Image (tube, grey):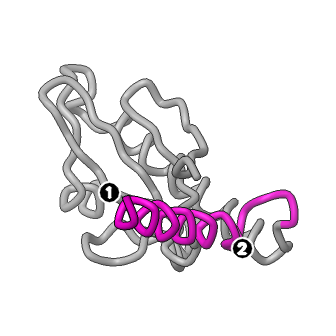
């Protein structure tokens, strides 16, 4: 019983510390963080546009991350499509390609709350963060 109570107390302490985190993209978002978030949104639009406009899209064949950079032309400054680099400062692209589509996330690596943009072959972009 005592072990259970201690484990519960420890779990609550850990959970409450995660609730106390200062999220970068909440109601009190600074103008600098809002600008970073907008740049990441532009990057998400670039990924969807490249995927939709490349020749294989008509046959539901999509580009892997390493292929995006080679297909890109006219990418806005500050956006990198090279694998193993930030797509925008402090934002990381994860892209998965399947037989008939793709999905990706662009996560703010500096945000303790894990704010992200996610999208897929449908082209809609969603904002997301882990449940706290």
Span of residues in magenta: 1-28
Mainly helix, strand or loop, the magenta region?
helix
Give the number of marks.
Answer: 2
Q: Helix, strand, or loop for circle 1?
A: strand
Q: Is residue 11 magenta?
A: yes
The answer for how far apart the CA atoms under marks 2 and 1 are is 24 Å
Q: Residue at x 41, y 72 (%)?
A: 80
Which part of the image, by quadrant, shows the N terminus? bottom left
Q: Which residue is mark 2?
A: 22
Residue designated by label 1: 94
Foreground residue, 14 or 94?
14
Query: Residue 87, percent across and down?
Result: 44, 69
The secondary structure type at the circle numbered 2 is loop
Residue 126 image offset from top left, x and y in percent: 57, 38
Q: Nearer the viewer, residue 64 or 49?
A: 64
- Residue at position x 85%, y 73% from top? 31
């Amino acid at each position: 019983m005592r072990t259970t109570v201690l484990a519960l107390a420890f779990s609550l302490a850990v959970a409450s510390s995660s609730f106390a985190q200062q999220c970068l993209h909440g109601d009190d978002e600074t103008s600098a963080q809002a600008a970073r978030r907008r740049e990441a949104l532009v990057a998400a639009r670039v990924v969807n546009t490249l995927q939709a406009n490349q020749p294989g899209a008509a046959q539901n064949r999509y580009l892997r991350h390493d292929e995006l950079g080679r297909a890109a032309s006219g990418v806005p400054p500050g956006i990198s499509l090279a694998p193993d680099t930030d797509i925008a400062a402090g934002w990381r692209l994860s892209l998965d390609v399947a037989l008939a589509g793709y999905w990706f996330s662009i996560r703010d690596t500096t945000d303790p709350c894990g704010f992200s943009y996610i999208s897929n072959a449908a082209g809609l972009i969603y904002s997301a963060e882990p449940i706290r």
